Amino acid sequence: MNDNLHTLRCFGCGARVPGAEARPDFRCSQCGDLFEVEYAGWGQRSGPDRPNPGALKWLWRERRCSSEALDQSGVWRFRELLPILDNFGNAVSLHEGNTPLYKLKNAAKTLGIDQLFAKHQGMNPTGSFKDTGMTAALSVARERGFKWVACASTGNTSAAMAAYAARAGLRSLVLIPEGKIAWGKLSQAMDYGAVTCQLATDFDGCVRVLTETVKQASIYLLNSVNPYRLEGQKTPAFEIAEAFDWTVPDHLIVPGGNLANSSALGKGFRELRELGLVARMPRISVIQAEGANPLVRAFTENNGEKMQPVEAQTRATAIRIGNPASWRKAAKAIRDTGGWCLDVSEAQTAIAKAEIGAEGLGCEPASAVTLAGLKKLCAQGKIAPNETVVLLLTGHTLKDADYTIDFHRGTLLTGEELKGNEALVAALKRDAVVVEATPQAVLAKLKGFGG
Ligand code: F0G
């Protein structure tokens, strides 16, 4: 069966190429921009290629009770909206997606918002949102007969790629910036059997090396310039819409690194609206770290029309990216939906992370910029109390345990970074204490904590 209905359309000049004819670096041969997957007929009001909204909603919900492996994936459950394979039997799945949507009660109360949720993509099989994109793009690699796949990564993409490649019986090559990724992520790439090369450069340098490498050997590139990654990463938009019974939240707040995820979610909501599954889109806001904020600068200087790379510096290593590949797509998603692009400081990120932890959820530092950004948006009066807000938490708290421990020990932030936040940090800090091995000593310690 050939389920495949797509072409690739250049985001810059609009040129179209068949999927199998894209260059190994996934750049348009005419203008050098990135591609987007396009499905013929979806934009039309009627016609044989346009999926039926009511039937789809029913089918997707039914699949949640199915015992078929493909139906149990929160990505392939929506396969009518990502017909990128000749045969869905080629899909490589680890039962990704179907992640929880939690209420953030304490933060909502503090900020005076009625409805605040966290869509926790860290609850995916390898602990980050990358799994949803990887199942899609790696399945394409397998279907097209590649033996090797590769990515440059700040850690999560490499963990996801290595796992999915291992499941598919493919070999994987990982390029990471030496000493600049969290150990949890590095350990995953090793465990899943990737060939892991630590390069003496940053993430942007790793991307440059890999782009040249894939032009010289038959290796399938799985960075988010690969448009099929975004097809998987758009599916949390479907899950969110479904969870709100096909209304959409007013705001979706996403961390920004290489800027593919915000682009993918924008595409997901746009397609739902085009197909008549939802009536409108949420405002999509992107939050970057102050030290890795090229898109924020672009919005300040020219409404996101031109971007200058920066030298990136942040402890949220997942988003330590100075030259994001998908910035044009993300800028369009922000502009088209009326969202904002903000940056947050190291202290604001660390505090927000501890607050998410204290709600029993936890996340990695790069995810916490969403709550820190929401606080800024609330302070600027951009969020009304009766609006519904969803934060996208992208990675699991165990990905970067060193960061968490340093925060609670009080060794994470410098005195300069702490300034003005001392009391807040002191109230959130929970260092582990050394106690004599007797019940009396433990009970005495409890007294100090109001026990
Ligand atoms: N949050 C986490 C936990 C990430 O790992 C990343 C990106 C982002 C947010 C930003 O998403 O790049 O789509 O804007 N990590 C990539 C990696 C770059 O290699 O794992 P983005």
Image (spheres, rainbow, N blue to C red):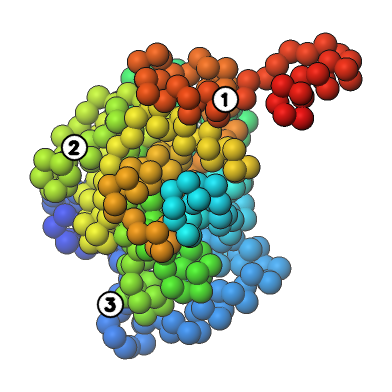
Residue named by callout 3: 43
Point out residue 174 in the picture as x, y percentages from the top left corner: 46, 31
The label number, if any, that marks residue 297 in the structure image: 2
Q: Which amino acid does label 3 sit on?
A: Gly
Nearer the N terminus, badge 2 or badge 3? 3
Question: Foreground residue, 379 or 326?
Answer: 379
Q: What residue type is labelled 1?
A: Lys
Point out residue 361 in the picture as x, y percentages from the top left corner: 60, 43
Contact, CB < 8 Å: mark 3 with mark 1? no
Can residue 87 be seen here? The reply is: no
| x 53%, y 17%: residue | 410
| Separation (CA) of disc 3 from disc 1 | 51 Å
Residue named by callout 1: 429
User: Closer to us: mark 3 or mark 1?
Assistant: 1
Question: Is 58 positioned to the left or the right of 259 in the image?
Answer: right
Point out residue 423 in the picture as x, y percentages from the top left corner: 48, 25
| x 62%, y 25%: residue | 430
User: Closer to us: mark 2 or mark 1?
Assistant: 1
| Separation (CA) of disc 2 from disc 1 | 32 Å
